Amino acid sequence: MKKYFSFAWVLAFALIACNNETEAHKNGEDHPHATTATEKFEMPSMPEVPNDATVFFENLKEGQTVGSSVAVKMGVTGLSVDTANGILKPSSGHHHILIDLDSVLTETVIPKDSIHLHFGNAQTSAEIKLPKGKHKLTLQFADALHRSYGAKLTSSVFVNVKE
Ligand SMILES: [Cu+2]
C-alpha cells in the first residue's frame, strides 16, 4: 500500500512538472516573435564575389602628379557595377573612394562624407578635388548596403597634387 502511495506521489510530481513545463512554454509564447523581430535587424550576409575579381584605378599610376581636380576612372574585373539600391546581388556592388585613409575591413558599412565618397549611381568615373600635397586614394568596392568587400577588392595609389 505504501508503495502505491509513493508511486502516486511520483506520478503526481511528474504531472506537475510536465504541466509547469507546458505553462513555461505558454508563457514563452512571445519568444518566437521576439526572435523574429531581432532577426529582422540582422544584416544579411555579404554577396559572393569571384576570388579573382579586382578593382583598380584605370587612369592613375602610383606617384602620379595631378592637378587639384583629378579625373578618376574606376575599373573592375569579374564584377558588375550597380546602383546602391539595397538589393544584394552576387558579384555586384558600387565604388567608394577613400581619401587619405587605409582600407577597411570586410562587412564594414562605410560612412558617407568628404573623405568617404560613394558612387551609388553606378558611376565608373568621377572628378575629385584635392588640396595640394601628397594624397592616398583608395578605391574600395562595396555591396548595395555600402558594406566593404574588404582588402581583396581594394586598390590604392598615392598622387601628388601640384596646385
Ligand atoms: Cu556606398
Image (cartoon, rainbow, N blue to C red):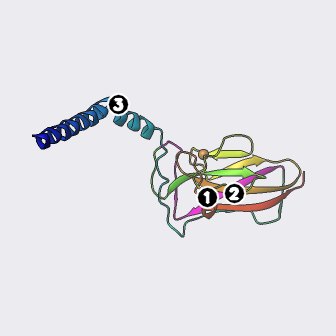
In the displayed orientation, state which residue is furthest to the front: 2
**Res 149 quadrant in image:** bottom right
For label 1, count other residues whose C-alpha is less than 10 Å away and answer few (under 14), some (14-19) or many (20+).
Answer: some
Nearer to us in this view, 10 or 150: 10
Q: What residue is shown with label 3?
A: 30
Q: Where is residue 91 in the image (x, y as percent from the top left)?
A: 48, 59
Residue sitting at 47 percent across and 38 percent down?
41
Q: Where is residue 99 in the image (x, y as percent from the top left)?
A: 76, 50
- First along the sequence among labels 2 and 1: 2
Q: Which amino acid does label 3 sit on?
A: Asp
Mark 2 or 3: in front is 3
On the rendered image, what quadrant is the N terminus found in?
Answer: top left
Earlier residue among tags 1 and 3: 3
C-alpha distance separating marks 2 and 3: 43 Å
For disc 1, the marked residue is 150
The circle on residue 107 is: none
Inter-mark Cα distance, 1 to 3 = 38 Å
Q: Which residue is drawn at 28% across and 37% down?
A: 21
Mark 2, residue position: 103
* Identity, as a three-letter code, of the amino acid under mark 2: Ser
Would you call the spot at circle 3 few (<14 residues within 10 Å), some (14-19), or many (20 or more)? few
| Closer to viewer: mark 1 or mark 3 | 3
Name the side, left or right, on which 71 lies relative to 130: left
Count how many numbered circles sit on residues in the image: 3
Q: Say if disc 2 is inside 8 Å of ligand 1.
A: no
**Mark 2 crowdedness (10 Å alpha carbons): few <14, some 14-19, many ≥20:** many
**On the rendering, which quadrant does ligand 1 occupy?**
top right
Depth order, front residue of 20/67: 20
